[in-house]
């Protein structure tokens, strides 16, 4: 489309309102809810002492995938890619990493002597969140070497990857507040 002088008229983006604004957030909330539901419904009882090699390979593979995706999102933040939505993706990856550790703890608890006080999936999720928050109530404790190893890995993983992701997000938010909203950029 051109104006009277023959110059091209730029169309301005209309702000999303109503359903158009809510839809992306509902999709992402649905993905997070699906991760939680999957955690409680997947047959995790088939992992652990019955299939130790599969359990460890699956644990390492899932954590590696989440770490690579987190690093990619962090890179997008520091490269200031306008088409990325790292806040949402990083949040979903954090939810996924919490559930990977939780599933691992649940599978490990099936082996005698690994944990005291961890009997259900909710116990495992609770222990994961308590460890992530560095609260440590002491009601669930890792007793076996494998359980202690995974707990140390979770603390290290959280310290390295989740802290880096949180730092990247706060940096991006601070930059956006200082610069203000920019035209033509996705939010």
Image (cartoon, grey):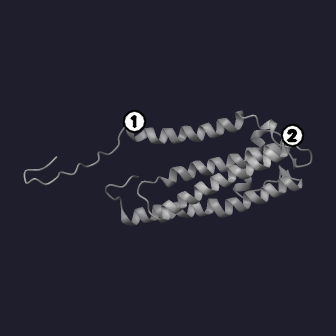
Q: Quadrant of residue 149?
A: bottom right
Residue lying at the far right of the rendered structure = 113
On the image, the x and y values in percent for residue 102 come to 74, 46
Residue 9 located left or right of residue 31? left
What is the tally of numbered marks visible in this picture? 2
Of the two numbered discs 1 and 2 in the rendering, the one whose residue sits closer to the viewer: 2
Q: Is residue 115 above or below residue 71?
A: above
The answer for how far apart the CA atoms under marks 1 and 2 are is 47 Å
On the image, the x and y values in percent for residue 28 come to 52, 42
Element under disc 2: loop
Residue under numbered circle 1: 19
Q: Residue at x 47, y 62 (%)?
A: 172
Q: Answer yes or no: is residue 105 visible.
A: no
Q: Residues within 10 Å of mark 2 (few under 14, many from 20)?
A: few
Residue 31 located left or right of residue 43? left
Q: Answer yes or no: is residue 85 visible.
A: yes
On the image, the x and y values in percent for residue 118 come to 83, 44
On the image, the x and y values in percent for residue 73 come to 53, 57
Q: Residue at x 32, y 45 (%)?
A: 15
Element under disc 1: helix
Q: Residue at x 66, y 64 (%)?
A: 160
Q: Quadrant of residue 49?
A: top right
Q: Is residue 45 above or below residue 74?
A: above
Q: Residues within 10 Å of mark 1 (few under 14, many from 20)?
A: few
For the residue pair 138 and 48, the one nearer the viewer reads as: 48
Q: Residue at x 58, y 54 (%)?
A: 69
Q: Which mark is residue 50?
A: 2
């Amino acid at each position: 489309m051109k104006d009277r002088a023959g110059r091209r008229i730029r169309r301005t983006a209309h702000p999303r309102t109503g359903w158009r604004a809510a839809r992306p957030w509902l999709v992402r909330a649905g993905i997070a809810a699906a991760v939680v539901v999957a955690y409680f419904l997947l047959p995790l009882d088939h992992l652990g002492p019955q299939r130790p090699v599969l359990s460890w390979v699956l644990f390492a593979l899932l954590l590696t995938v989440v770490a690579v995706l987190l690093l990619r999102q962090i890179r997008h933040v520091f490269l200031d890619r306008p088409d990325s939505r790292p806040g949402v993706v990083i949040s979903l990856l954090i939810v996924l990493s919490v559930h990977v550790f939780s599933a691992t703890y649940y599978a490990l608890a099936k082996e005698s002597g690994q944990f005291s006080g961890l009997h259900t999936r909710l116990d495992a999720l609770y222990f994961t969140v308590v460890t992530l928050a560095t609260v440590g109530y002491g009601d669930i404790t890792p007793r076996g070497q494998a359980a202690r190893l995974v707990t140390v890995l979770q603390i290290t993983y959280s310290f390295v990857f989740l802290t880096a992701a949180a730092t990247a997000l706060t940096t991006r938010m601070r930059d956006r507040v200082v610069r203000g909203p920019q035209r033509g950029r996705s939010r």
